[in-house]
Image: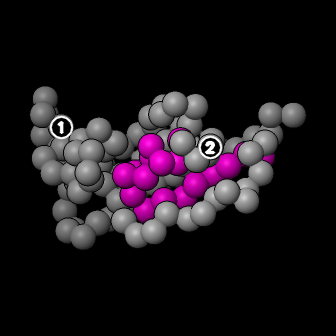
């Protein structure tokens, strides 16, 4: 997982975006005041069985943050399935390229 950055100098009233390889940092990001976190790493499980879901998730939280959008406190987390992975196969888990448009609240 690596070291977490020191974000204490970042202004609290500004929009705060975190790009993280893994969604495992989500609870820390919410506590640190981030508004939006974008992550991948889990690839949606790559193999998803009907009625069961992902077979294996490389995350400390298991299937909890497999793919999609999640509200954690006041922060929004988006986990992309991505287009590839360590293994070149997928089943029941289509690859995706995510387009997110950010707009000013002003």
- Provide the residue designation for mark 1: 53
Of 18 and 44, the residue lying toward us: 18
Of 62 and 81, the residue lying toward us: 62
| Quadrant housing residue 40 | bottom left
Of 98 and 104, the residue lying toward us: 104
Colour mode? one colour
Residue at image point 68% right, 49% down: 16
Q: Residues within 10 Å of mark 2 (few under 14, many from 20)?
A: many
- Provide the residue designation for mark 2: 33
| Residue 67: image location, x then y, percent | 36, 43
Residue 95 in view here: no
Start-end of magenta stretch: 14-30
Residue at image point 77% right, 51% down: 11
Residue 53 in view here: yes
Q: Is 24 a magenta residue?
A: yes
Is residue 33 shown left or right of residue 37? right
Of the numbered discs in the image, which one, if any, rests on residue 7? Answer: none
Is residue 6 shown left or right of residue 51? right
| Residue 104: image location, x then y, percent | 80, 40
Eyeballing the image, is 23 above or below 35?
A: below
Q: Which element carries disc 1, helix, strand or loop?
A: strand
């Amino acid at each position: 997982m690596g070291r977490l950055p020191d974000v204490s100098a970042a202004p609290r009233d500004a929009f705060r975006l975190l790009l993280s390889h893994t969604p495992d940092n989500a609870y820390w990001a919410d506590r640190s005041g981030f508004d939006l976190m974008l992550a991948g790493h889990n690839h949606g499980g790559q193999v998803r069985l009907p009625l069961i879901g992902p077979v294996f998730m490389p995350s400390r939280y298991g299937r909890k943050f497999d793919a999609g959008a999640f509200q954690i406190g006041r922060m929004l987390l988006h986990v992309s399935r991505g287009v590839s992975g360590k293994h070149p196969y997928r089943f029941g888990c289509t690859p995706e390229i995510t387009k997110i448009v950010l707009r000013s609240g002003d």
